[in-house]
C-alpha cells in the first residue's frame, strides 16, 4: 500500500515516517510539505535522513488522492481545517494528528484553540480515534491529543463503571518538551526548561474540552474536571496523575479488577499488578502503563498513567488507527517494548 504523509519535518511526522517505513503493509511513503514550497529531498532536511531517497513535494490534494490509499497529517493546529476539506468531500481516508477535527462543536474549537474552526458539516464526518477504547471509525480519523490520551485511558474504567464521584476528578499531568513541537520559544529555551518544572496553560489547556467531550459520552453526569499541565525537563514522556473520590469504599484490588475488565484484551495497555509506572517504562513503545491505588484514609482513588507523547500520544496511536481502519492486526508495525535503559 502507498500512503501519504504531510509534515515529516516535525517531531510527530519524523516518528510517523520511521513507523511507516517499518510497517509491513506499507510499500511506499509519499511526502508532502507546504503547498507553496518547492520540492526538497528529504536528506536535506535533517542529518539523520542522509541515506533517504524520498522527496518532499508541495501539498496537492488531488495528487495525494490519486497516488495513495490514505493520508496522514502531522501538521500544526489550524492547518487541516484548511487543507482537509477535499479529502472529506471525496470520502478519502485521513488520519489527522492535530486537534482540528477532535471537537464536534466548532464554537469550542474557536474558544480553546482561538482559531477559525472547520465547517460543522465537515466536523460531523470525523471520528475520534482513541485506539485502545475502540469505537467505529469513519474515513476521517481525528487522532487524540497526547495529554487527552493518557488521561482518558487512566479514567475510562472509573468513569464507565461509575466508581467515583463525578464532581471529584483532578488530573495533574506532566509532559516532556517534544510535546510542544520543534519550534523553539522563550518557554522552551534550554535555560528555562533545564533544572526546572513549570505549570502552564492553567485552566486553558486545549485538551480540556476534548476530554470532557469523551468523558460525557461515557457518563453524562460528569460536569467538569480540574486539569493541570506541567512541563518537565525530559524530551519525551507524559505522566498523568489522576485523583478522584470513590463513590463507596473500595480496595486497591477492586480498582485493579475494574481496570483489568476494561483493558484485558488491549495489547498496548498495561495495568500493573503492583506499584506505579515511570515514563521510562513506556518511552519508545506504543504502550500506556497504568498504576492504581485506593487510599481508605481519604477515600481517594489514585491512577498514574504514562505514555510516550510521540508514540501513543501521536504517531504510534496513528499507526494503531491505521491498523484498525484497514483491519490489520492491531500491533502490526508497532513497538510493544520501550527503549531501555
Ligand atoms: N508533539 C507531540 O507530542 C504531539 C503533537 N500532536 C499534534 O500533531 C501535530 C504535529 O505536532 P508536532 O510534530 O509536535 O509539530 P511540529 O511543529 O514539530 O511540526 C509541524 C509540522 O507541520 C508542518 N506544517 C505546518 N504548516 C504546514 C502547512 N501549511 N502545510 C504543510 N505542512 C505544514 C511543518 O512543516 P515546516 O516545518 O516546513 O513548517 C512541520 O513538518 C500538531 O497538530 C500537534 O498538536 C499531537 C499529539 C502529540
Ligand atoms: C509540552 C507541550 O507544550 N505540549 C503541548 C501539546 C500539544 C498538542 O499535543 O497539541 P494538540 O492540541 O494538537 O494535541 C501543549 O501542552 O499544548
Image: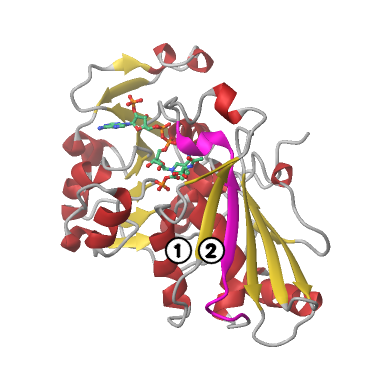
Residue 265 in view here: no
Q: Is residue 55 above or below residue 139?
A: above
Magenta segment boundaries in residue numbering: 164-181
Specify whether residue 95 is painted magenta.
no
Residue 246 in sight from this viewpoint: yes
Sequence-first tag of 1 and 2:
2
Q: Secondary structure at mark 2?
A: helix
Eyeballing the image, is 121 above or below 220? above
- Above or below 333: residue 206: below
Distance from disc 1 to disc 2, alpha carbons, whole Å, reads: 7 Å
The local crowd at label 2, few if under 14, some if 14 to 19, many if 20 or more residues have their Cα within 10 Å, is many
Q: Please tell me the numbered disc located at residue 138.
A: none
The quadrant the N terminus occupies is top left
Percent position of residue 15, x then y:
51, 34
Mark 2 highlights which residue?
152
User: Residue 101, how many percent across, how many down?
Assistant: 30, 55
Q: Are marks 1 and 2 in contact (CB under 8 Å)?
A: yes
Q: In the image, which disc is placed on residue 211?
A: 1
Residue 217 shown left or right of residue 64 in the figure: right
Task: Return the x and y of residue 121 as percentages of the image width and height.
Answer: 17, 63
How many numbered circles are shown?
2
Identify the residue shown where x is 19% and y is 49%: 116
Residue toward you, 289 or 322: 289
Q: Residue at x 67, y 29 (%)?
A: 195
Amino acid at each position: 500500500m502507498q500512503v501519504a504523509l504531510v509534515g515529516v519535518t516535525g517531531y510527530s511526522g519524523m516518528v510517523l515516517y520511521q513507523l511507516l517505513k517499518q510497517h509491513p503493509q506499507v510499500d511506499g511513503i509519499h511526502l508532502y510539505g507546504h503547498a507553496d514550497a518547492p520540492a526538497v529531498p528529504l536528506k536535506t532536511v535533517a542529518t539523520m535522513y542522509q541515506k533517504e531517497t524520498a522527496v518532499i513535494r508541495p501539498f496537492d490534494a488531488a495528487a495525494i488522492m490519486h497516488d495513495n490509499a490514505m493520508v496522514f497529517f502531522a501538521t500544526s493546529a489550524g492547518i487541516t481545517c484548511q487543507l482537509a476539506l477535499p479529502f472529506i468531500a471525496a470520502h478519502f481516508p485521513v488520519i489527522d494528528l492535530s486537534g482540528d477535527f477532535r471537537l464536534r462543536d466548532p464554537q469550542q474549537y474557536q474558544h480553546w484553540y482561538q482559531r477559525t474552526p472547520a465547517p460543522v458539516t465537515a466536523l460531523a464526518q470525523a471520528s475520534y480515534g482513541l485506539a485502545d477504547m475502540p469505537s467505529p471509525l469513519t474515513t476521517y480519523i481525528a487522532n487524540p491529543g497526547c495529554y487527552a490520551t493518557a488521561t482518558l485511558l487512566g479514567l475510562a474504567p472509573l468513569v464507565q463503571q461509575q466508581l467515583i464521584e463525578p464532581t471529584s476528578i483532578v488530573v495533574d499531568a506532566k509532559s516532556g518538551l517534544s510535546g510542544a513541537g520543534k519550534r523553539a520559544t522563550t518557554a522552551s529555551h534550554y535555560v528555562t526548561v533545564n533544572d526546572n518544572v513549570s505549570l502552564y496553560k492553567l485552566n486553558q489547556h486545549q485538551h480540556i474540552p476534548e476530554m470532557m467531550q469523551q468523558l460525557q459520552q461515557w457518563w453524562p453526569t460528569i460536569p467538569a474536571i480540574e486539569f493541570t499541565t506541567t512541563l518537565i525537563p525530559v524530551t519525551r514522556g507524559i505522566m498523568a496523575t489522576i485523583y478522584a473520590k470513590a463513590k463507596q469504599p473500595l480496595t486497591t484490588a477492586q480498582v485493579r479488577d475494574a481496570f483489568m475488565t476494561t483493558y484485558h484484551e488491549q495489547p498496548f495497555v498495561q495495568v500493573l499488578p503492583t506499584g506505579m509506572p515511570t515514563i521510562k517504562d513506556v518511552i519508545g513503545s506504543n504502550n500506556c502503563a497504568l498504576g492504581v491505588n485506593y487510599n481508605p484514609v481519604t477515600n481517594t482513588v489514585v491512577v498514574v498513567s504514562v505514555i510516550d507523547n510521540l508514540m501513543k500520544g501521536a504517531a504510534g496511536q496513528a499507526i494503531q488507527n491505521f491498523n484498525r481502519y484497514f483491519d490489520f492486526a492491531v500491533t502490526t508495525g508497532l513497538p510493544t517494548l520501550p527503549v531501555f535503559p
